[in-house]
Image (tube, rainbow, N blue to C red):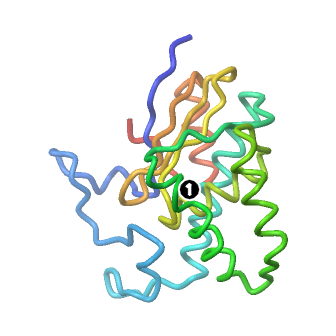
Amino acid sequence: MRIKERVIVKYNPKYYDAKGVYTKDEWTEFSDIGREFEGKRLSLEEYLEVENHFIAFVEDCLDVAGCRYLTIDWSWEYEKKVFRDRIKGVCKLDPNFDESECMTLIHEIEEKNRISIPIAMYLFRLMLRNSFNLSLSNRKRRIKFYMGYEYYLHFFTCIDSETLKEIAGKHNLYVVW
């Protein structure tokens, strides 16, 4: 079966116009927390609900594909060079920050190209928050994904369209192509 790119979004397809432009005023990134959209302020809780849906979607897809690990595909060499500092900065935002755990995480990621699903999901959460750009993949299971601009998840897989739509729907997400 051929790998196909699918785009997964939080945006309801009924609000795209004939040219494919999304017509509702909605938040597009982590930094939008506290801003107002269509008369309603985006709270951290509302943001986290959507973020958690994306993570659960990817976890379900990895489960369907039988993935037990992923590999890091660095998008830019620049990102690889600043990765350590960015991870430290993000870890410090966590109220339970433990520098030794953070350094262990950094070491594991830098030293091993193959990472566990829990670590991959931690990195995915940071990708959702625009901390850095990279893609995660499992070539054997024929899956690769990365976050694009404006909360568009680019997902490359052999999982059939109907299954992807079912998983996305379960998490209040949409497969737009």
Residue 3 drawn above or below residue 176: above
Q: Which residue is at a point 46% across and 47% down the rendered structure image?
A: 77
Label 1: state its secondary structure: loop
Q: Which residue is at a point 71% across and 51% down the rendered structure image?
A: 109
Q: Position of residue 111 (x, y in %)?
A: 74, 46
Image-quadrant location for residue 113: top right
Q: Which residue is at a point 29% across and 57% down the rendered structure image?
A: 15
Q: Position of residue 139 (x, y in %)?
A: 63, 24
Q: Which residue is at a point 48% across and 55% down the rendered structure image?
A: 79
Q: Residue furthest left?
A: 19
Q: Position of residue 56 (x, y in %)?
A: 69, 53
Instruction: Please state if 45 lies on the left or on the right of 106 as rendered.
Output: left
Instruction: Please state if 145 lies on the left or on the right of 31 as rendered.
Output: right
| Residue position for label 1 | 172
Circle 1 packing at 10 Å, graded few (<14), some (14-19), many (20+), is: some
Image-quadrant location for residue 23: bottom left
Name the amino acid, label 1: Asn
Q: Position of residue 152 (x, y in %)?
A: 42, 51
Residue 141 drawn above or below residue 18: above
Instruction: Looking at the picture, tell me which residue is in the foreground, 176 or 62.
Output: 62
Instruction: Looking at the picture, tell me which residue is in the foreground, 105 or 141.
Output: 105
Instruction: Looking at the picture, tell me which residue is in the foreground, 67 or 82.
Output: 82
Work out which quarter of the rendered image holds the C terminus and state it. Answer: top left
